[in-house]
Image: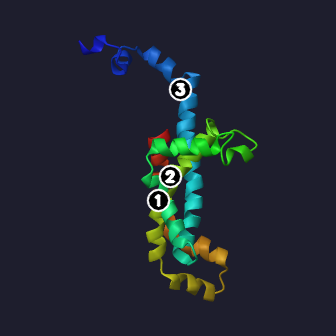
């Protein structure tokens, strides 16, 4: 009999509704869900803003080392998640390259989970926004400037509305990757 074993599915199938409710409302369950989904939301929001900036720089500017910078964006795609987690833990450990200089614990703490979630989600944002930025007609931005719009007005009223669907998709991909890999 399959369900006479200690399989998780068998154990959970035998729980009553009251036991399920107790498990779902347990403080540890709520803390885990809060870190998983709350952390993924925060990481995706940060990635969306940072990824827009990175994609903007990669599309609009030419500079020495651009190809290397562009390749580094893809690093989380190339690294297995476990390797990325171990590497980040070593870098942010109290005696790590960056961890020794930080006034608070990152590795093996909530900030470390957020850093890992941001690390794996950022390339999705950049690679989603890059082709959309490349396809935007610069003449529209030039026309706004010729009509007296400031750079900020042009960005907020001309460029950003064109990017809105791609930004929503980029956010969604970063959120899904964070939940899927570390949630």
- Write down the residue under mark 3: 29
Name the residue: 56% across, 65% down: 54
Nearest the viewer among 25 and 101 is 101
- Write down the residue under mark 1: 74
Q: Is residue 176 left or right of residue 101?
A: left
Q: CA distance from mark 1 to mark 2?
A: 10 Å
Q: Is residue 129 left or right of residue 155?
A: left
Nearest to N terminus: mark 3 or mark 2: 3
| Furthest residue toward bottom | 146
Visible residue check, residue 38: yes
Locate residue 134, reporting x and y percent: 46, 75
- Rendered position, 101 above or below 52: above
- Write down the residue under mark 2: 121
Locate residue 73, reporting x and y percent: 51, 61
| Furthest residue toward left | 1
Q: How many marks?
A: 3
Locate residue 101, reporting x and y percent: 74, 47
Q: Nearer the viewer, mark 1 or mark 2?
A: 1
- Rendered position, 27 above or below 72: above
- Specify the quadrant of the image occupied by residue 156: bottom right
Q: Is residue 90 left or right of residue 163?
A: right
Q: CA distance from mark 3 to mark 2?
A: 24 Å
């Amino acid at each position: 009999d399959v369900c006479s074993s200690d399989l998780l599915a068998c154990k959970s199938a035998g729980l009553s509704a009251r036991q399920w409710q107790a498990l779902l409302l347990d403080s540890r369950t709520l803390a885990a869900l809060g870190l998983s989904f709350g952390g993924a939301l925060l990481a995706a929001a940060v990635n969306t803003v940072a990824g827009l900036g990175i994609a903007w720089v990669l599309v609009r500017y030419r500079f020495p080392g651009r190809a290397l910078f562009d390749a580094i964006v893809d690093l989380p795609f190339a690294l297995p998640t476990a390797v990325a987690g171990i590497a980040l833990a070593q870098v942010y450990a109290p005696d790590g390259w960056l961890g020794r200089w930080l006034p608070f614990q990152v590795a093996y703490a909530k900030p470390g989970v957020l850093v890992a979630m941001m690390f794996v989600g950022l390339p999705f944002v950049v690679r989603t926004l890059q082709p959309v930025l490349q396809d935007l007609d610069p003449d529209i931005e030039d026309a706004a400037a010729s009509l007296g719009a400031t750079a900020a007005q042009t960005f907020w009223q001309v460029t950003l509305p064109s990017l809105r669907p791609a930004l929503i998709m980029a956010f969604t991909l970063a959120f899904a990757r964070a939940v899927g890999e570390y949630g």
